[in-house]
Structure formats: C-alpha cells, structure tokens
Image (cartoon, grey):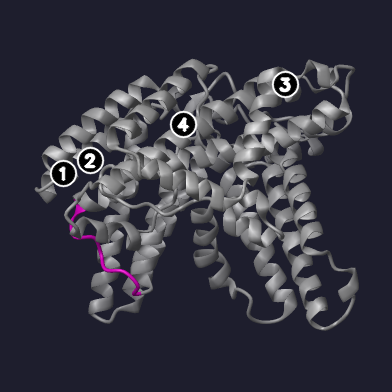
Amino acid sequence: MNFHSLEFLGFLALVLGLFWWAANRRGLRTGILLVASLVFYGSYELWYLSLILFSTVLDWWCGNQIHRARERGDPRGMRRGLHLSLLGNLGVLGFFKYTDWVFENLELLSEWLGFGVSPWAWRIGVLPEFLLDSDLGRMIVPVGISFYTFQTLSYTIDIYRGQLQPARNLGEFALFVSFFPQLVAGPIVRASTFLPQFELLPHLDRARLHSGLWRIATGLLKKVAIADVLGAYLVDPVYGQPELYSQGVHLLALYGFALQIYFDFSGYSDIAIGTAKLMGFDLPENFDLPYRSRSVREFWRRWHISLSTWVRDYVYFPLGGSRGSEMRVSRNLLVTMFVIGIWHGASALWAMYGLLQGSVMVLERALERARAGGTFARSLPTSALAWVLTFHFTVFSLLFIRARDLNHFADMLTNFGGQGMGSVHGYAWLALAGGVLTHFVAPSLTAAVERRFLALPTVLVGLAVGVAAGCVAVLVVGDTPYIYFQF
C-alpha cells in the first residue's frame, strides 16, 4: 500500500475518522491505530505479520525482564534479557537479509575449490515457497524489517542502560513498533521519543493540521514529480542499458540518481511525518538538505538522520567514539560506516560503500588535525571547494548503490554508446531542474513559502493539497514503490 496511491488515501481517511472519534479514550484510540498498522503491514504480505509480532512480543518480554532484574539488583539477569533481545532480533534480520549473501560467498569459494555448488540448491526442499522469490533467485526480504528491528532494539538497550522505563502495556508498545506512517521506511523512532506521547491527549489545531497537510503535499510531489520522473525517464533507461549512452549521459544519470534517491526517501519521510501530525504524533526529522554538506561527516549528520544517530549511539559510542588513539578512532569510524553499509544491503558493493565513506571520514579527521597543528594549512580546501569535493564524492559513491553487482558496476564506468544529450527526455530535464532548485534554493525562501502556506485559510490549504494529489495522479509513471522499501 504505497503512500502515493488512491488505496492509501481511502485507508488514511478511514483511520483518521475512527481515530478522532475515539480520541478521548486512550485504550480505544491505541487499539484503532494498532489494528490499522497491522492491516497496513499485512497488505504487503500477510505472513510478514508473524515477524513483527515475534519482534514485538520478544522485546516487550525482554524489556520487562531487564527492568525487573535491575530492580532486584541482578546484573546477570539484565544481561540475559539484553542478549536474548539481540539474538532474537539480529537472528531474524540476519536470516532474511544476509543468508543469501553468505551462501553466494560460499558459492564463490566452492567454485575456487572446484566443487561448483549452487547457493540456490540449499533452499530447495528446505524453505517453504512463500519465503523464496523464484524470479530473482533469492530469499524474500520482508519490507521494513531493518527499520523496526533497530527500533525495537533501541527499546531494550535503553532499558538496559537505565535510560528508559518499560512501556505501560503491550498494546502501546506494539503500536510503537508497528505505527504505520513510519513502519516500512522510517524515520527510525526511539521509544523514549514515541512512548511519552501516549500520555498526552491528542489535539489537532489549525497549525498542526496545516503543517501535516503541507508535509504530505510536498512529500507526494517530491516522490512522484521528481524522483519517479527521474527514474523513469533518465536513471533506469541509462543504467538498464548502459552500452547505449554516451559518457555525458552517464554522468547526467548519476546526478539524476543522487536527486532521485534523495527526493524518493525524503518524500516518504515528509509524508510519514505529516500523516503522524494528523493523528497528534510528532516524528523526528530525517533529512536536512544533505547535498549542501561540506564534509562527509556533515553529510551523514544530514542524511537519514534517524539511522545515523542510531548507529552513533548504539555502535560508534560503545566502541569508544572519538576517545583514545587515532588508530582506535579510525577503527570506530570504519566499523560504524561498515554497519551502515550492510544495514542497507547484503552485498559486496554495500560493504565497499560503507568502508569508502568511513575511509574518507578518517581522511577528513586527519586533515582537520593537520589544520589545527598548522601543518599543510594552506593546502586544505576552502569552504566552497569543500562543498564541491564533498558533493561529487557523495554523488560518485552512489555508483556502488545503483549497480546491481560488480559486473554492472564496471559497465557503468566503462561501457558507453553513441546516444548523447539529445536522447534525454524533456521530462527528465524538468525534474532535474526542479530537484536542483528545490534543494539548493536559500532555506529562508523555502521557510517563507511554508509560512505563507500555513497562514492560508484551511479551505485553501485543502484545495492546494487536492491540486498536489491531482498532479500526483497525472504524473504517476507506474507501480514505483519507495527505494528504501528494499532495505
């Protein structure tokens, strides 16, 4: 059930009506949202519900066990509860997301040793058919599993650290895990942020209503008018048949993909945040104009903020963070970015992408220390040059994301044809222009436009959202799920 579909529009209208009808009754409104969230997730595949229910019950029980063990002064019991949560969640995530990668590497090893065993063979007769995608020759990765796994893990870890009290009841905890606006592609919400909102009586004043509608409308336009158009008319054709297009078109497609993945994911986040606002909930921001960054570290503070901060708090800091020797700090950065890489996808390209990001962060840190020590200070980039270098590194590193495998990666770099800029569709040029202007316009101008929108009469706000929805209906270029659904 994609956000940019009439099906979701009808679903949301029904949920909002029922929710506000029961707004003054805490248990009833929680139950309505929980049922709606499970229906939403089950609309992708019914059996996905078994996984999210397993994760919910496991972490609810583990969180309570850790809390009880703390109260009776039993650190060993606390560790047992935490380890069970880690084992259960990471075990399920690892099975669905990384088993294929392990067996693909075993295939390479077997070929090198001369055995020639296919990794697909182990699945036949072992796993039920509904777990397998025979067209792709892979196991199915349930949509959103990486998101809600990290979300529930933060709950038990925070209780273990003594930073959070357990949820009031299982129903509210289950809603925290499965809340449909952000369930399948984030933002990754912490329990410490979401659970306290149950204590507040929901309200929908004029400012919140207008703000929610603004986020939904802009998110829809980002997704359909920019991301989907770039994908359909530039990125997919070029990287579907790289041998047909010239080097210039390849370069344009790479810039196009940078805009496509940003507007696709930030558009989803906008709709999620806006939809939650209409139900009285506040979700964290997930993007802050990342392509304006002047360093790779700054980029990751602006891109997918909820993931970056999660990995910072639960991986980087426990490893030691920026404390200790430079060698230790470099290791911490590399491990953290490797985790971010393979969180996105189980492949050598994603692992390489994460290690590349971490390596450049290590280099940036070394240059900053050289600047502080007065060494090579004149050779360090200016602010403008730092932006140019950061932006183009970020864009070109996306080759690792767009490529299907190492052979396709090589084709994208070396296999060119004769079709030049004249082959690029006019819609693609319009989407490129819209993406650049939208992202790089002065933030003060964007804020001024938003303020004027929020100040309009509610009737005009509704009309503007209707126009945006109409544009979406006209511009839909096919069944285009959000890119981050695959993660």
Residue tagged 4: 220
Which label belongs to residue 387? none
Spot occupied by residue 199 in the image (x, y as percentages of width and height)? 19, 60
Tell me which segment is drawn in magenta: 162-170
- Magenta segment's dominant SS is loop
Pick the front one: 289 or 335:
289
Q: Secondary structure at mark 3?
A: helix
* Foreground label between 1 and 4: 4
Badge 1 vs badge 2, beta-carbon distance below 8 Å? yes
Which label belongs to residue 29? 1
Question: Residue, x 82% and y 83% (percent of image)?
Answer: 373
The magenta stretch spans residue 168: yes
Q: Is residue 336 above or below residue 89?
A: below
Amino acid residing under circle 2 = Leu
Q: Secondary structure at mark 4?
A: helix
Residue tagged 3: 240
Amino acid residing under circle 4 = Leu
Q: Secondary structure at mark 1?
A: helix
Of the numbered discs 3 and 2, the one sitting upstream in the chain is 2
Which quadrant of the structure image shows residue 369?
Answer: bottom right
Q: Is residue 338 visible?
A: yes
How packed mark 3 is, by other alpha carbons closer than 10 Å (few <14, some 14-19, many 20 or more), is: few
How packed mark 1 is, by other alpha carbons closer than 10 Å (few <14, some 14-19, many 20 or more), is: some
Q: CA distance from mark 1 to mark 4?
A: 27 Å
Spot occupied by residue 248 in the image (x, y as percentages of width and height)? 85, 29
Of the numbered discs 3 and 4, the one sitting upstream in the chain is 4
Amino acid residing under circle 1 = Arg
Of the numbered discs 4 and 2, the one sitting upstream in the chain is 2
Which quadrant of the structure image shows residue 466?
Answer: top left
Residue tagged 2: 33
